[in-house]
Image (spheres, rainbow, N blue to C red):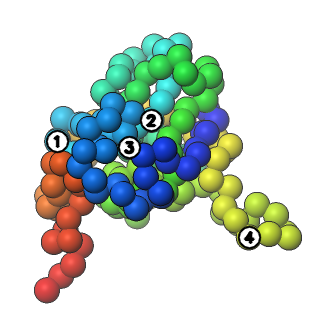
Amino acid sequence: MLLVSNHPRWRCHVQGDDVSWIREIETCKVRGPDGYQYEPLWIHPTDAGKRGIKSGDILEMYNERGSVLGGAYVTERIRPGAVYQDHGARDDPISDTLDRGGENNLISPYGTTSANAQGLATSGYLVEVKKANIPALMTKYPDAFKRPFDYASGSTYEAWVKR
């Protein structure tokens, strides 16, 4: 599938991602079964149906560079064969190749967009999507899922700073 990834409409990259009232907007975050608010991953009903996906499911978007989790937002506002997820989300790594925060820049192509300019190819690259098994991931990576987070505003200072 083709990943379309634009600048976020509800924040400036990660700035503003911790604003609790913005996170209440339907297209801003999708709450998973673990209480975590995942970055929405828009998918067309045709593609979702082929994969047994419904709105609210937690998905794994992946390619040869790694995987990123996101919350399914099934809508006809995305073309069949493409998925959409904002880029610039907060990095919340589960492992070296799996991110919980929706930071799809981590699986974007390596290198720059041109020999004459520096910039990442943050949109228009290939991925595949499948349902994520959150209980299995919680068992496999217990430390990542035990990190503190605020149900309203996401990752916390205490989750990352060691004293």
Q: In the rendered image, which quarter contains the C terminus?
A: bottom left
Quadrant in the rendering for residue 95: bottom left
Per the image, label 4 sits on a secondary structure element best described as: loop
From this view, report whether residue 29 is shown above or below residue 81. Answer: below
Q: 106 or 19, which lies in front?
A: 19
Q: CA distance from mark 3 to mark 1?
A: 13 Å
Q: 16 or 46, which lies in front?
A: 16
> Mark 2: which amino acid?
Leu
Q: Can the viewer see residue 120?
A: yes
Label disc, if present, on residue 39 of the rendered structure:
3
Residue that label 4 marks = 118
- Identify which residue is drawn at 43% across, 31% down: 130
> Mark 4: which amino acid?
Gln
Residues packed near mark 3 inside 10 Å, few (<14), some (14 to 19) or many (20 plus): many
- Identify which residue is drawn at 66% across, 61% down: 120
Label disc, if present, on residue 14 of the rendered structure:
none
- Identify which residue is drawn at 39% across, 21% down: 53
Q: CA distance from mark 2 to mark 3?
A: 7 Å
Residue that label 1 marks = 35
Q: In the rendered image, which quarter contains the N terminus?
A: top right
Residues packed near mark 1 inside 10 Å, few (<14), some (14 to 19) or many (20 plus): few
Per the image, label 1 sits on a secondary structure element best described as: loop
From this view, report whether residue 75 is shown above or below residue 30. Answer: above
Q: CA distance from mark 1 to mark 2?
A: 17 Å
Q: Do the CB atoms of the residues marked 2 and 3 lie less than 8 Å apart?
A: yes
Residue that label 2 marks = 41
> Mark 1: which amino acid?
Gly
> Mark 3: which amino acid?
Glu
